[in-house]
Structure formats: structure tokens, C-alpha cells
Image (spheres, rainbow, N blue to C red):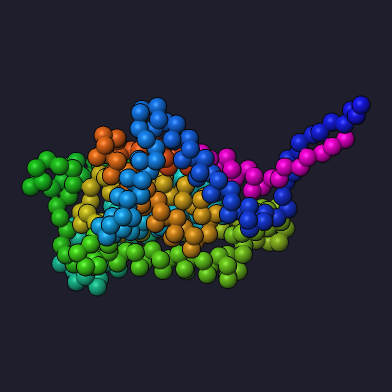
Amino acid sequence: MSNTKTKIKFEKRLETPLIVNIVVPIVGVILALIFCSFLLLAIKQNPLAIYGMMFSGAFGSAYGLSETLVKAIPLILASLGVSIAFRMLLWNIGAEGQIFMGAFAASLVPMFLPNLPFFITLPLMFILAAIFGGLWCLLAAIPKALWNVNETIVTLMLNYIAINWVEYLVYGPWKDPNGYNFPYTKIFGQNSWFSTFGTTRVHTGIIIAVIMAFILYFAIQKTRWGYEVKVIGESPKASRYAGMNIKKNILIVMFLSGALAGIAGMGEVAGISHRLTDTISTNFGYTAIIIAWLSRLHPLMIVIVSFLFGGLLVGGFSVQMVGLSGSTALMIQGAILFFILAGDFFTKYKIKVIKG
């Protein structure tokens, strides 16, 4: 009788095959949907009917498609931002706050310089949003670069400061006196508005978002800086040995990360609300984390996945017709993030069966 024992060992991959990078996220999404199906069954809802309703609401009509694109714009920009940081293993969890700071900075122009022509107003809003978003992220990057302070906690806490700062403004000194006591500023002049396509709410921010994705793709794949970012993320020791300036790159990467999220905030002000509100972002910054991981940090894949997640958000509103909360979409997002992060283990390690 054989006494052969079988052992299962997890072995670190030297290189992750492309098929693994494709299959693991897909399996993660499927498992997340199955998991959420049990939750829906627990409240006596048909999962297939709910998922079908969400899909139809987001992609089954011209209006649904246009609203999906509207939601995709800030998701693309914020996801591009966090993806840069994640490449260097810098955990920028503060995109939500950076969106708010970008929206605040963009609002300074129409609030205090309302008579500028649009060809000055919009570029100035763009620049200020990028600078303020980037500087907000630098508040975490500087202590990280100098003293190795945990950037995850700092960026997360900065979210609450930024959100509360905007709330203070729209409930207080910037509140529209003719706004029936609602927390928002007065409507900004049309010189600060993005153009829209036809009768939809899709605005020129979509062009900016796609251009940024291509620029980031080129920068990561074709430039020396992009090479340094990848090397530092994969092997800090090797990058130090090669003479790469890690502290400098931490500051640059985190500034760009925050700047892209800040531009997302500007897009919501100039393209959608045309004023500053306390709901300028509906968790776009947190959803961006899921999208970045699901896209494997690839800038062009981020555009596609952001569109799908925009559909998930729009579909979440559709299910309210059957009495479910719109936060159903947020539940699904959370489940997807959980399974994607868990599945990431299998992109780094492979299972090896040892008999002996």
C-alpha cells in the first residue's frame, strides 16, 4: 500500500501569463455576481430579473447609454489617477477627496472671475483643478517620501477633510441665497460650461478623459519615466541599485494621481452640475479603485471598464422601480472589489501539487 502524500504548495510566479491576467478578473466578477445573487434571494428577489433590469436600464436605450457615458467620465479620470500610484505600490485611497478639491478649485474661477471669456475660463478651471487635486495628494506623498509615513491612512483621512470643506462652503458662505435652502452655490455662467452632444448630458469631458488615457498609456509604455515607475513598483531594491530617484518619483506620481482626480471634479462642475454641490461625487473615487484593479492598471482598459461600471451605476437606479435601493449597485461594486483583490493572489502565485 503506497504511503505517497500529496502536498499543495503556492509558488510565486516569475512572470504572470496574459491568460491569467484576463481570466482571474472575469472569474472574480462572476463570483461576485453569484455572491450577490444569494443576498438578493434572501430578500425574495429574482437575481436574473434584477441583473436584466440593470443591464436594460444602462444599455437598452439611447438615454441609458448616454447616462452611462456621463458616469464613465469621472470614473475614467479618477481610475487613471489611482492606477499611476498603484503601479508604484503607492496606495492612493484619496481620489474621492481629490475630486472634491478639484471641483472646489474649478469653482473659484466662475465664482470670483465670472466675466472672463470661455476660452480663458475653462482652461483656468482645468489648471486649478489639476493643481489643487495634485497638491491635496502631495499632503500624503511628502511624508511618505521623507519619513515613509503610511500613505493609505493619510489619503483616506484627507477625503473627509476635503468633503467637509466643500460642505462648509455650500452650506455656508457660498450657499445660493435663492436656492430654497439647498446646499449648493448659485448657477455658474455658461462661459464655464462644457459643450454637450446633442440633447444628451454627455459633454466634452469624455474627450479629455480618453485623451488622458492615451497620454498615460504612451507615458507608461514608451518613456523612461514610465519605465522607472514600473521598475520601482516591481522592485524598489533594484531601482535603488540602478540609481533611480525614488523620492522624486513618489512626489511626481502622487501629484499626477491627484491631478487626474482633480480634473474629474472639474468635469462634474463644468459638464454636469454647473455649480458646486456637496454631492459633486457619488463615490467615484472609491469606485475608481475597483476599476483600476479590474483593468490590471492598463490605461486603455480603464476606459472600457469605466464604461461598464458607469452602466452599473445607471442600472442601480433602474432597480428602484421594483422597490430595491439604488445602493444595490454599490453592494455589487463592493463584492466585485472583494473578489478581485482575493483573486489577485492567483496572479502572483501558482498552485503546485507535490507528490512524495
Residue 114, position as x, y percentages in the image: 16, 63
Q: Range of the magenta residues?
A: 337-356
The residue positioned 20% from the left and 60% from the top of the image is 110
Q: Image height check: is 271 above or below 52?
A: below
The answer to if 197 sits in the magenta stretch is: no
Residue 87 makes an appearance in the image: yes
Tell me where residue 199 appears, x and y as whole percent. 19, 64
State the residue in front, 91 or 294.
294
Left of 13 or right of it: where is 116?
A: left
Residue at (15, 55) in percent of width and height: 187
The quadrant of the image that shows the C terminus is top right
Residue 183 quadrant: top left
Residue 296 place in picture, x, y as percent: 55, 54
- Residue 60, by quadrant, is bottom left
Q: Which residue appears at 76% of the width and 42% of the height?
A: 352
Instruction: Determine whether, in the image, residue 262 is placed left or right of residue 245.
Output: left
Task: Between residue 124 and residue 291, name the one nearer to us.
Answer: 291
User: Can residue 262 be seen?
Assistant: no
Count of labels in the image: 0
Q: Overall secondary structure of the magenta stretch?
A: helix
**Does residue 22 appear left or right of residue 79 in this picture?**
right
Name the spot of residue 163 as percent of width and height, x first.
Answer: 32, 42
Q: Name above or below for residue 210 compared with residue 56.
A: below
Report if residue 347 lies within the magenta region: yes
Instruction: Please name the residue shown 27% across and 60% down the image.
Output: 62
